[in-house]
């Protein structure tokens, strides 16, 4: 615990300061770290830090620091970091950068993002070479001087927020990488649509039917294979509901069990006649199940 004597600063952690009191007594730097501003001319935004572990009181006002090291510097010589001792002043509110969500960016339509969507931090740090033209992501957006910028990563976004003056005013070269817009599946020709839309699912189904080589009782090989593929596609369709997938997984399992009756009975019934007492326990059950399929092959294979 730090105690505030005349002209000295004190840490305010665990002093039960309410958000309302904090808001009214914030110093001239608001939620920005005064040490970052004084030593590095950086905008160290601490607004997303709700706890006051690295906050201090000086001359009746509160100041938030970005970390333990800067808190110690502030507590040792607070007058060096506040007005009039601070060598740098905080920009006017309309000149401060602020994060934007994807929805906020979309709501600004028809305003377009700057630099055609290329990340200004990646471009400048890459010495403004063509290879450093990397497109930003809408989830990492910042508004600065009424302009919108998007960044490659959160780290690049944070770097811009600290020193926006370094990156905001850049010109793109006359030649830039082409814009890669997503292509709608429905705009592709039939073969292209199938390749992009269902190829993976069909390959998995064909692989499964090829490995199993199913032959359903009283159905031809071709129809057995087609039904198996149909059940498989429905059972593993990730766009279907969980209920539907589970339903067809049960149908697929039942179909496989029916197909397994043929090799089981053919191997069990080889050789001379055996009395019921010498037959396998499940033989009668599986034989009756097999014979029942002769009258109801379609009922057991309904999609």
Image (cartoon, rainbow, N blue to C red):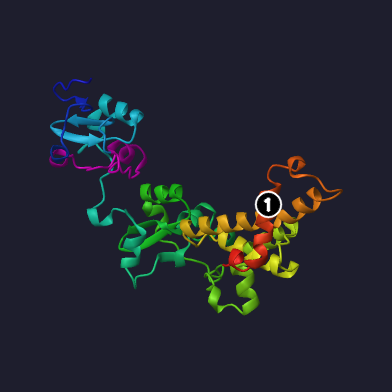
Residue 35 figure quarter:
top left
User: For the N terminus, which image quadrant?
Assistant: top left
Q: Position of residue 15 (x, y in %)?
A: 18, 27
Q: Position of residue 258 (x, y in %)?
A: 67, 57
Can the viewer see residue 282 in this picture? yes
Q: What's the residue at 77%, 40% (across, down)?
A: 278
Viewer-proximal residue, 110 or 282?
282
Q: Position of residue 69 (x, y in %)?
A: 35, 28
Viewer-proximal residue, 297 or 255?
297
Please state if 142 lies on the left or on the right of 299 as rendered: left
Q: What's the residue at 16%, 25% (across, down)?
A: 7
Magenta segment main secondary structure: loop
Q: Is residue 47 magenta?
A: yes
Residue 233 figure quarter:
bottom right
Viewer-proximal residue, 12 or 6?
12
Please state if 128 lies on the left or on the right of 219 as rendered: left
Secondary-structure class at tag 1: helix
Q: Position of residue 220 (x, y in %)?
A: 74, 69
Q: Dot 1 surroundings within 10 Å: few (below 14), some, or many (20 or more)?
A: some
274 up-or-down from 152: above or below: above
Can the viewer see residue 236 in this picture? no
175 up-or-down from 285: above or below: below
User: For the C terminus, which image quadrant?
Assistant: bottom right
Q: What's the residue at 35%, 44% (across, down)?
A: 42
Q: What's the residue at 49%, 62% (across, down)?
A: 240
* Residue bearing the label numbered 1: 286
Q: Which residues are magenta?
A: 23-49
């Amino acid at each position: 615990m730090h105690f505030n004597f005349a002209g000295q600063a004190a840490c305010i952690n665990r002093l039960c300061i309410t958000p309302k009191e904090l808001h009214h007594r914030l110093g001239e730097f608001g939620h920005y770290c005064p040490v970052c501003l004084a030593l590095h001319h950086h905008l160290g935004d601490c607004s997303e830090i709700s706890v006051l572990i690295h906050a201090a009181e000086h001359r009746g006002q509160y100041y938030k620091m970005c970390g333990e090291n800067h808190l110690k510097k502030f507590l040792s010589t607070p007058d060096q970091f506040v007005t009039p001792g601070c060598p740098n002043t905080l920009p006017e509110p309309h000149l401060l950068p602020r994060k934007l969500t994807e929805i906020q960016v979309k709501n600004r339509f028809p305003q377009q993002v700057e630099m055609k969507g290329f990340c200004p931090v990646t471009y400048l740090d890459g010495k403004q070479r063509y290879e450093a033209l990397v497109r930003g992501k809408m989830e990492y957006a910042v508004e600065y001087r009424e302009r919108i910028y998007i960044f490659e990563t959160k780290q690049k976004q944070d770097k811009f927020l600290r020193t926006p003056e370094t990156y905001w005013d850049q010109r793109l070269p006359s030649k830039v990488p082409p814009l890669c817009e997503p292509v709608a599946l429905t705009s592709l020709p039939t073969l292209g649509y199938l390749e992009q839309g269902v190829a993976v699912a069909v390959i998995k189904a064909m692989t499964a039917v090829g490995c199993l080589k199913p032959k359903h009782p009283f159905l031809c090989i071709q129809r057995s294979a087609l039904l198996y593929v149909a059940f498989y596609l429905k059972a593993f369709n990730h766009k279907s509901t969980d209920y539907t997938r589970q339903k067809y997984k049960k149908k697929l399992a039942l179909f496989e069990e029916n197909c397994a009756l043929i090799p089981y009975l053919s191997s069990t019934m080889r050789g001379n006649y055996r009395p019921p007492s010498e037959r396998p326990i499940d033989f009668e059950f599986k034989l009756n199940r097999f014979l029942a399929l002769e009258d109801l092959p379609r009922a057991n294979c309904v999609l």
